[in-house]
Image (cartoon, helix red, strand yellow):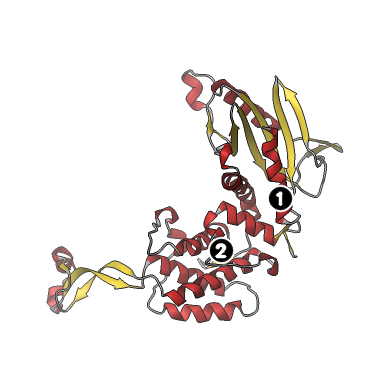
Amino acid sequence: MKLYKDSIPVGNIYYMLAYAFRDLREQGIVSVCPEEFDNIRQLMAEIIIRGVSYQLKKGLLRSYESCTDEQSFVRGRIDISETVNRGSLIRRRLVCSYDEYTEDTLMNRILKSVMILLVRSELRPGQTDELKRLIRYFGQVSEVSLSDIRWDGLSYSRNNREYRLLMSVCRIICENMLHSENDGEAKILDFSEDNLPKLYEKFILNYFTVHHSALSPSSSEIKWAFSGEGAKLFPKMQSDIMLTKGNRRLIIDAKFYSHTTAENYGKHSFHSHNLYQIFTYVMNESESFSGDVSGMLLYAKTSDDIIPDEGCAVNICNKKFYVRCLDLRGDFNSICSQLNNIPEIL
């Protein structure tokens, strides 16, 4: 299996994406073997190819779209003001607004635009030709500016729910792999390392949401345990993951660094600002939660191997604090096993 960024297997990046973007788990639509690919770019292209191929067999989504243009006859509603502004009457034409049942929908435009973008990137042999073949079926579909899409504004119903998977993949490509050059041309890059910390957090939260829902996983705000005129100037405290079991609560701060510890003059130590942060979270949350609150720094394991496999645990001000590493370099089952051990401390 090829490694991503010389440390994390491409397959594990895919599975992290699958939890972070829950729709990727709809294996009834698309099933791929991530270990077959050298990078995330090729993997995303394969998901698009298989997903679009599946959708074409069922037929592209069609819906009524609002159109406004000049007509030589009345169609729909006459837009009088626009007719006057355009001087259409001089040409014996009318500007009409009407609904047309068409394949030229926003979701189809997104699919076509992403496939065109993928064609210009470095893919596996055969993937480029397959994408070009699929694009031909979108002849009646226009393109769209991928940087202007309001992803949260996309709505799904019984008729278009199978597009949710494809839109999730397109969103990953556009938000995490899209790069605009000085000449205005967009390029597909590999999944940016800058995005891995946020992906890491989201993956862990959604993993617990799927497999340990009884612990009420959340990313809740922690309120400062004081009030006063200056309170509004203090920064917002937002936990990465919060697990609750009865009268016990664990706050997890997920950290993704190239090195899990800081080194000064040959001596390794935990990142001080991480310790101050989790300590602040726990002490303030303890004021509003009636039970026991503990904290954990959960680092993505790197090659330095300074933190022991079993982690570290200390008591500070009668509160329990843990430091552990999550090894993302092995097979995904081992990652699941490591995460499943965390609730045992509650």
Label 1: few (<14), some (14–19) or many (≥20) C-alpha neighbours in 10 Å: some
Q: Which residue is mark 2?
A: 27
Image quadrant where one finds the N terminus: bottom right
Q: Residue at x 70, y 33 (%)?
A: 345
Residue 162 lies in what quarter of the image? bottom left
Q: Is residue 314 above or below residue 200?
A: above
Image quadrant where one finds the C terminus: top right
Q: Which mark is residue 126?
A: none
Residue 99, given in percent of the width and then of the height, sits at 24, 68
CB within 8 Å, label 2 to label 1: no
Viewer-side residue, 142 vs 248: 248
Tell me which label, 2 or 1, sits earlier in the chain: 2
Label 2: few (<14), some (14–19) or many (≥20) C-alpha neighbours in 10 Å: few
Q: Amino acid at mark 2?
A: Gln
Residue 105, given in percent of the width and then of the height, sits at 37, 68
Between circles 2 and 1, the one closer to the viewer is 2
Judged from the image, the secondary structure of the residue bearing numbered disc 2 is loop
Residue 129 lies in what quarter of the image? bottom right
Q: Which residue is mark 1?
A: 335
184 vs 59, left or right, is right
Q: Amino acid at mark 1?
A: Ile
249 vs 83, left or right, is right
